[in-house]
């Protein structure tokens, strides 16, 4: 049976500013499964990024618990959380901040060596992953400013994967890319998920959402829809598109 990778119970997040409280996440009980490619959708301001940050331990919940692969995140102090994130989470954001003064390969190695001190092993893995996402040897010594947006994002994905995270978190990873670059980046996510990597991704984009096998819809801090789409395949895209479109229409998207 597939195991849960994340389980939240009564997860709440409230922001306070100028004496006003905003309840952004409201009593969320969510279970994400290993090897799933879960998509989080919802209108702007519904709490998607806040949920992603809470589940990854980047931000602490106001109330409730998060169990991440058997670890209760509430029991970890800030330093332990930082180590936990480094060892078990990968992050891909809309803007990829590669270090401009380092080559492509060194950017990836810098992250890998934080966890594994064996440079030969890390380098081998970095090269394998770079090849896997279509960043060939001729690009390894390039600097980030010499890359296209899509290439930089693919390097960002490799950097996020170098420490074999249990879960890859992505927040609008194709938001800044044109259509062709976005497709090549989505193909990478599809491939890594097919290799067993669990992914949870926030997106506003239907084409991106179609890559997931499960769609959670967040409205006003509450999960109000949960669609099983089945595993992505290039073949049944019309059917998937129809199913997702109907679901989103029901959600009032
Ligand atoms: N650090 C913060 N301090 C105060 N309010 C915040 C903070 N982070 C988020 N919020 C508020 O929480 C609400 C939800 O924000 P969040 O970024 O999670 O929404 P979202 O669904 O990801 O939106 P979008 O699709 O526009 O990115 C917003 O009203 C936002 O202003």
Image: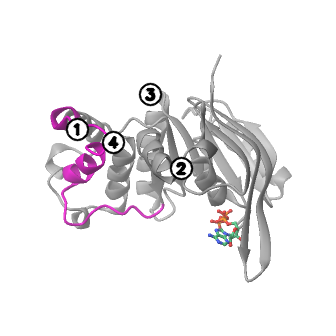
Q: Which numbered circle lies on residue 195?
A: 3
Dividing the picture into quadrants, the one containing residue 73 is top right
Secondary structure found at label 2? loop
Q: Is residue 51 above or below residue 235?
A: below
Specify whether tag 4 is near ligand 1 (CB below 8 Å).
Answer: no
Dividing the picture into quadrants, the one containing residue 76 is top right
Q: Residue at x 71, y 67 (%)?
A: 45
Q: Is residue 94 above or below residue 154?
A: below
Nearer to us in this view, 97 or 253: 97
Q: Is 168 on the left or on the right of 243, as rendered?
A: left
Q: Of discs 2 and 3, which sits in the foreground?
A: 2
Asked whether the beta carbons under mark 2 and mark 1 sit within 8 Å of each other, the answer is no
Location of the C terminus by quadrant is: bottom right
Secondary structure found at label 1? loop
Q: Residue furthest top?
A: 1
Q: Position of residue 61 (x, y in %)?
A: 68, 55
Asked whether the beta carbons under mark 2 and mark 3 sit within 8 Å of each other, the answer is no
First of labels 2, 1 by sequence position: 2
- Residue bearing mark 2: 77
Report, in whole angstroms, how far the alpha carbon at label 2 lies from the one at label 1. Answer: 24 Å
First of labels 2, 4 by sequence position: 2
Q: Residue at x 26, y 34 (%)?
A: 125
- Residue bearing mark 1: 117
Report, in whole angstroms, how far the alpha carbon at label 4 lies from the one at label 3. Answer: 13 Å
Q: Which residues are magenta?
A: 94-121
């Amino acid at each position: 049976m597939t195991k849960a990778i994340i389980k939240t119970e009564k997860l709440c997040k409230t922001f306070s500013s100028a004496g006003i409280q905003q309840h952004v996440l409201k009593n969320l009980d969510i279970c994400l499964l290993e090897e799933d490619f879960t998509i989080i959708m919802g209108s702007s301001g519904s709490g998607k990024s806040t949920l992603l940050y809470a589940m990854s331990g980047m931000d602490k919940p106001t109330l409730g618990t998060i169990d991440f692969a058997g670890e209760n995140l509430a029991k970890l102090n800030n330093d332990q959380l930082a180590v936990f994130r480094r060892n078990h989470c990968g992050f891909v954001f809309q803007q990829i901040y590669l270090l401009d003064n380092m080559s492509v390969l060194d950017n990836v190695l810098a992250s890998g060596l934080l966890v594994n001190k064996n440079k030969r092993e890390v380098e081998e893995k970095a090269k394998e992953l770079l090849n896997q996402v279509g960043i060939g040897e001729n690009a390894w010594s390039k600097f980030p400013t010499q890359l296209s947006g899509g290439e930089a994002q693919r390097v960002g994905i490799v950097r996020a994967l170098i420490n074999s995270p249990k879960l890859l978190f992505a927040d609008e990873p194709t938001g800044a890319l044109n259509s062709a670059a976005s497709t090549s980046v989505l193909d990478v996510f599809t491939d890594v998920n097919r290799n067993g990597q669990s992914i949870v991704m926030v997106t506003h984009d239907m084409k991106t959402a179609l890559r997931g096998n499960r769609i959670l819809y967040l409205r006003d801090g509450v999960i109000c829809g949960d669609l099983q789409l089945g595993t992505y395949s290039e073949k049944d895209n019309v059917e998937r598109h129809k199913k997702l479109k109907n679901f989103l229409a029901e959600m009032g998207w």
